[in-house]
Amino acid sequence: MSGQREKEEIPVTFAPAPARDARFDVKERWIECNNLPPGDPGRAIEFLHRQMNEEINGMECAARTLVDFPDTAWDLRMCIARQCYDEARHVEMFRELLERGGGRVGQSPVLNFQYRIIAHVDNLVGRLAVQNRSFEAEGVDAVEPEILSARARGDGHLAELYDAQLADEICHVRYANRYIAEVASRDPASVMRVGRALDYASRAFLQVMGREAIDSVNYPVNRTGRLEAGFSPEEIEHSSKLRSAKTASRSRGPV
Ligand SMILES: [Fe+2]
Ligand SMILES: [Fe+2]
């Protein structure tokens, strides 16, 4: 067994779960959720429900960061507070779309892994690296195909909503990238805290999602969005190559 595989299999610790009322059926692992196959008539509504809960997680994480790091510089606290407000609007947007499509809050199981992973990181630079520079940057990639797909279906209203959400998510990634770079320039040891936080998050994420869910990601890196969000061209190229390598290994199948 390789050292990497052994590392992946060591159970990680999570922060306590965020509160949810009795309508929600909260699960611990992706495999326990309603993972409907492409083409299933319920898949689109289930997606909206899942996204709504993910936005609740985003709002809760930002709020938790404000509480846990009260001595942070005021400008950064304002960015985090604005993110709270943005994520709350995203929750309302997805709830409206869900209910307009005939769905209801609590209709299918949810995961709260974002909060449980992010709130477990005990330093600000590590936490923003995991929430904003990692999870939210993935969101920047994921929203772009939804905008194109909504436009292709002639649903201009939905395309506009996703476009507005994308603009918000880019701002969330950008302020975190600026803060992480600024801290690294005056405190090089912060790079170690970022590395440790990202390593923890990737092991925790794998434990919740399983290799199958991670490998099912099939959208490309949003190069323009990531550039606007403060990633360097070299970082974007690296992310793109990683994503392409995963796609290629899936299409080849096991050897
Ligand atoms: Fe959001
Ligand atoms: Fe966000």
Image (cartoon, rainbow, N blue to C red):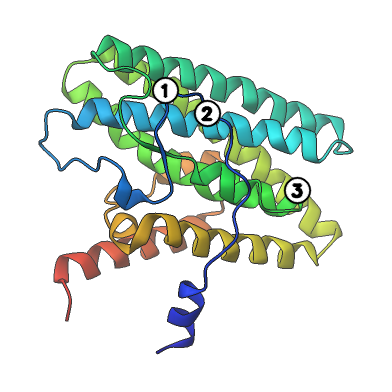
Tag 3 near tag 1, CB within 8 Å: no
Identify the residue position indicated by label 3 in the image: 124
Identify the residue position indicated by label 2 in the image: 20
Could you say where residue 80 lies in the image, as x and y percent from the top left? 70, 31
Residue at 69 percent across and 54 percent down: it is 126
Cα–Cα gap, marks 1 and 2:
8 Å
The reply to whether residue 224 is visible in this rendering is no
Could you say where residue 43 lies in the image, as x and y percent from the top left? 20, 32
Q: In the rendered image, which quarter is residue 253 located in?
A: bottom left
Cα–Cα gap, marks 3 and 2:
25 Å
Tag 1 near tag 2, CB within 8 Å: yes
Kindly identify the amino acid type of the residue bearing the numbered disc 3: Leu
Could you say where residue 6 lies in the image, as x and y percent from the top left? 47, 81
Establish if 83 lies above or below 235: above
Identify the residue position indicated by label 1 in the image: 23
Q: Residues within 10 Å of mark 3 (few under 14, many from 20)?
A: some
Could you say where residue 96 lies in the image, as x and y percent from the top left? 37, 12
Establish if 207 lies above or below 155: below
The reply to whether residue 89 is visible in this rendering is yes
Mark sitting earlier along the chain (3/2): 2
Q: Secondary structure at mark 2?
A: loop
Residue at 78 percent across and 50 percent down: it is 182
Q: Secondary structure at mark 1?
A: loop
